[in-house]
Image (cartoon, helix red, strand yellow):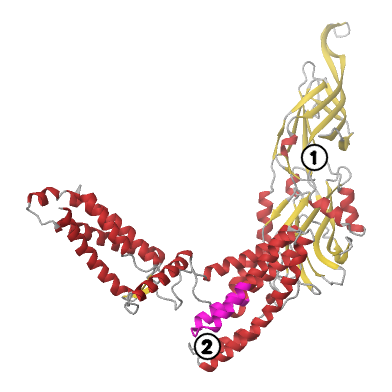
């Protein structure tokens, strides 16, 4: 059919006439690859619609009542309308028609760097530190959020009964969630269900409760030995009680409490601390043993000679021994791991932020009696060797999770930094012991911990340990523990090649919006000094790379470090070869503030991986990747890079025909004319 032939021919000319993929200016707008794709898509869609319309004119053309070029004009017109509509929509959605910010057209998300960001790195700080800077309000809100996630309610427990249970109904309640090695409430309710004489009663002499874990081991046995007498309340027995409730505080099986206590009072042991942070709670069931007896009375009617009438009296009938064991069926389903992870900042911020003093929230691992005690760690943004950092440990007890049993939670704590030595021994680098006393409310510790390094030091680790007593005032207090390990990695106190003084001088030189020859000379001198500093880092990284050959993660990390250092060097080179102030700022920012510290992070990560400290290595690597993602926001898009290559080919093509100086826009107009005329000629030939 003529419409399909016309459409095919039109598509061939359209593809041939797509504009260069690199950007050029037309009518005050920057035109690039995205516009070419939008115009092409819209023209194809419009051309197809036009071909359908033109198909209806076939009969008129065949009859000679309409010229052969009419369908071509219809298709071309529809294509133009479609191209314009789609490109307009594309530019509106992408903001391409927004006021130009002065950057080059590269397809990058960002094209310039503010003076504030250039000097202070505020955006980079937020990227690495997160939004949680310390304040009493933010700390309380953070703790409340964690508390809500770990909150537990009370529910009915089902159980099996063995032995004799007569004339009394027993129900059991406990928490619907138990996290970790926590103390938790158990409520037993006894209701008499006596029949017969009002004088009958149930007497419970002893109630024993304990846990049995998945291996059959008995834990935390408790006895309630006060006699409980249950009897129907009536006129003859007005003080009798028909129901009775006992509240117990129990605790999940905990083989680690002794080890936790030892880390409060004795020299810390890293193996024990790591065992605690990774400890898993055992599943268990509750067992209740009830001992007592039931006394049944009966009514008899006898003749009384004295009263000369029949009288009714009660006599003892029989006794039933209570010897009952209740075993829960689903307590094991309420048990959850006490280990939890909180997101936040990782490792350390670059040393360029050493003067920032406001603590930030760090990601951390926690374990222990999570239903009873939860915590969060804030600390200085920068952690580097031979310095100290400020810490803020915020904790709160959760007595609400022990309701209906009223309890108090009192503690001893220890904040400590371990120094990991090259002989495999961990020793105390710094510690702060103490106690919060009553932990039923929001509590916090602010302290300073140091990272003094000697020739044998390989790394540091920070821990915060709490051992608390949960006391219900009924029996001896139950000891519980909570351990927090912030995801902090201490780094070398490195200097950056482009320091703040250099950056301030560069801004001053470009303050008038241009770069003179003398300005350019001084900027080049500054960049060359920065390059020399960067080369020293590259040399060290290259010399260290050989020792990581046997560790894949370390090997990959040092390779990434060298790659980022190379990218930093490349941007310094670009900065020396431009007279555009915005480009100088962007290129030196990417070199000195983004790629160089990213390379430093990878270099530190390689060292941590090689020591087997994979989590610290991962934390450092994640920061490097955050900086690399920041760099990507300033770099040309994939489409622009591809378009630049096509542009080079197109320029060579034009030069080969001696039309290298002819603007692309002018050639585009010529091609469109050729498109229309060529299509008319071809259709006449086909006809």
**Can you say whether 301 is above or below 201 in the image?**
above
- Can you give x and y, in whole percent of width and height, for residue 158 in the image? 72, 29
User: Is 307 situated left or right of 645 in this image?
Assistant: right
Q: Note whether residue 499 is visible.
A: no
Residue 638 is one of the magenta-drawn residues: no
- Mark 2: secondary structure: loop
Image mark count: 2
- Mark 1: secondary structure: loop
User: Is 495 situated left or right of 267 in this image?
Assistant: left
Q: Give the mark nearest the N terminus, 2 or 1.
A: 1
- Can you give x and y, in whole percent of width and height, for residue 143 in the image? 69, 57
Question: Residue shown at 57%/69% (left/top)?
Answer: 631
Q: Residues within 10 Å of mark 1 (few under 14, many from 20)?
A: some
Q: Main secondary structure of the magenta part?
A: helix
Residues marked 2 and 1 touching at CB (< 8 Å): no
Q: Note whether residue 257 is visible.
A: yes
**Which quadrant of the figure has residue 350?**
bottom right
**Which quadrant of the figure has residue 616?**
bottom right
Residue 510, labelled with which disc? 2
Question: Residue shown at 86%/25% (left/top)?
Answer: 203
Between residues 565 and 103, which one lies in front from this camera angle?
565
Q: Residues within 10 Å of mark 2 (few under 14, many from 20)?
A: many
Circle 2 or circle 1, nearest the eye: 2
- Can you give x and y, in whole percent of width and height, for residue 29 in the image? 35, 74
Query: Which stretch appears magenta?
Result: 566-592
Between residues 31 and 146, which one lies in front from this camera angle?
31
Residue 611, labelled with which disc? none
Residue 282, labelled with which disc? 1
State the CA–CA distance, disc 2 to disc 1: 67 Å
**Can you say whether 349 is above or below 315 in the image?**
below
């Amino acid at each position: 059919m003529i419409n399909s032939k016309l459409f095919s021919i039109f598509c061939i000319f359209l593809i041939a006439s797509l504009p260069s993929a690199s950007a050029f200016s037309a009518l005050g707008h920057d035109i690039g690859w995205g516009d070419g794709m939008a115009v092409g898509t819209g023209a194809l869609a419009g051309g197809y619609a036009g071909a359908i319309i033109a198909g209806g004119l076939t009969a008129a053309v065949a009859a000679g009542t309409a010229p052969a070029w009419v369908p071509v004009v219809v298709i071309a017109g529809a294509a133009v309308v479609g191209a314009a509509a789609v490109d307009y929509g594309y530019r509106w959605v992408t903001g391409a028609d927004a006021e130009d910010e002065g950057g080059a057209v590269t397809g990058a998300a960002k094209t310039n760097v503010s003076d504030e960001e250039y000097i202070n790195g505020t955006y980079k700080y937020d990227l690495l530190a997160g939004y949680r800077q310390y304040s009493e309000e933010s700390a309380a809100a953070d703790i409340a959020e964690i508390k809500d996630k770990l909150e537990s309610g009370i529910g009915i427990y089902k159980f099996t009964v063995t032995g004799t249970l007569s004339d009394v109904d027993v129900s059991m309640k406990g928490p619907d969630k138990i996290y970790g090695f926590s103390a938790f409430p158990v409520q037993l309710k006894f209701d008499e269900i006596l029949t017969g004489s009002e004088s009958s009663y149930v007497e419970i002499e002893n109630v024993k409760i304990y846990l049995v874990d998945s291996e059959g081991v008995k834990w935390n046995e408790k006895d309630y030995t006060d006699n409980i007498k249950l009897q129907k309340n009536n006129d003859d027995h007005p003080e009798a009680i028909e129901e009775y409730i006992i509240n117990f505080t129990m605790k999940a099986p905990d083989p680690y409490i002794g080890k936790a206590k030892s880390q409060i009072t004795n020299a810390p042991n890293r193996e024990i601390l790591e065992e605690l942070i990774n400890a898993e709670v055992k599943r268990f069931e509750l067992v209740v043993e009830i001992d007592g007896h039931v006394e049944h009375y009966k009514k008899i009617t006898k003749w009384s000679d004295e009263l000369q009438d029949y009288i009714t009296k009660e006599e003892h009938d029989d006794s039933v021994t209570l010897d009952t064991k209740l075993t829960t069926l689903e307590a094991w389903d309420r048990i959850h791991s006490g280990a939890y992870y909180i997101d936040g900042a990782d490792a350390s911020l670059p040393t360029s932020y050493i003067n920032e003093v406001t603590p930030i929230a760090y990601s951390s691992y926690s374990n222990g009696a999570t239903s009873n005690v939860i915590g969060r760690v804030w600390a200085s943004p920068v952690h580097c060797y031979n310095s100290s950092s400020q810490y803020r440990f915020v904790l709160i007890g959760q007595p609400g999770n022990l309701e209906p049993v009223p309890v108090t939670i009192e503690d001893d704590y220890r904040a400590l930094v371990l120094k990991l030595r090259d002989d495999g021994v961990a020793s105390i680098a710094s510690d702060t012991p103490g106690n919060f006393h009553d932990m039923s409310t929001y509590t916090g510790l602010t302290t300073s911990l140091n990272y003094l390094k000697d020739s044998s030091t390989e790394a540091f680790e920070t821990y915060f340990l709490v051992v608390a007593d949960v006391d219900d005032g009924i029996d001896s207090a139950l000891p519980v523990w909570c351990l927090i390990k912030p995801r902090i990695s201490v780094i070398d106190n490195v200097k950056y090649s482009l320091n703040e003084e250099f950056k301030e001088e560069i801004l001053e030189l470009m303050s008038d919006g241009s770069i003179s020859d003398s300005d350019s000379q001084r900027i080049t001198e500054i960049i060359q000094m920065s390059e020399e500093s960067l080369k020293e880092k590259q040399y060290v990284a290259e010399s260290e790379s050989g020792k990581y050959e046997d560790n894949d993660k370390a090997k990959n990390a040092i390779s990434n470090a060298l790659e980022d250092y190379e990218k930093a060097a490349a941007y310094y080179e670009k900065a020396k070869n431009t007279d555009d102030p915005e480009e100088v700022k962007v290129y030196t920012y990417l070199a000195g503030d983004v790629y160089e510290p990213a390379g430093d992070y990878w270099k530190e990560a390689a060292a941590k991986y090689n020591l087997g400290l994979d989590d610290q290595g991962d934390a450092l690597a994640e920061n490097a990747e955050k900086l690399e993602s920041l760099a990507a926001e300033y770099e040309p898009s994939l489409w622009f890079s591809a378009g630049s290559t096509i542009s080079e080919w197109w320029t060579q093509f034009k030069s080969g025909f001696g039309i290298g100086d002819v603007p692309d826009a002018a050639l585009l107009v010529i091609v469109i004319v050729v498109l229309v005329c060529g299509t008319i000629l071809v259709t006449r030939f086909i006809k």
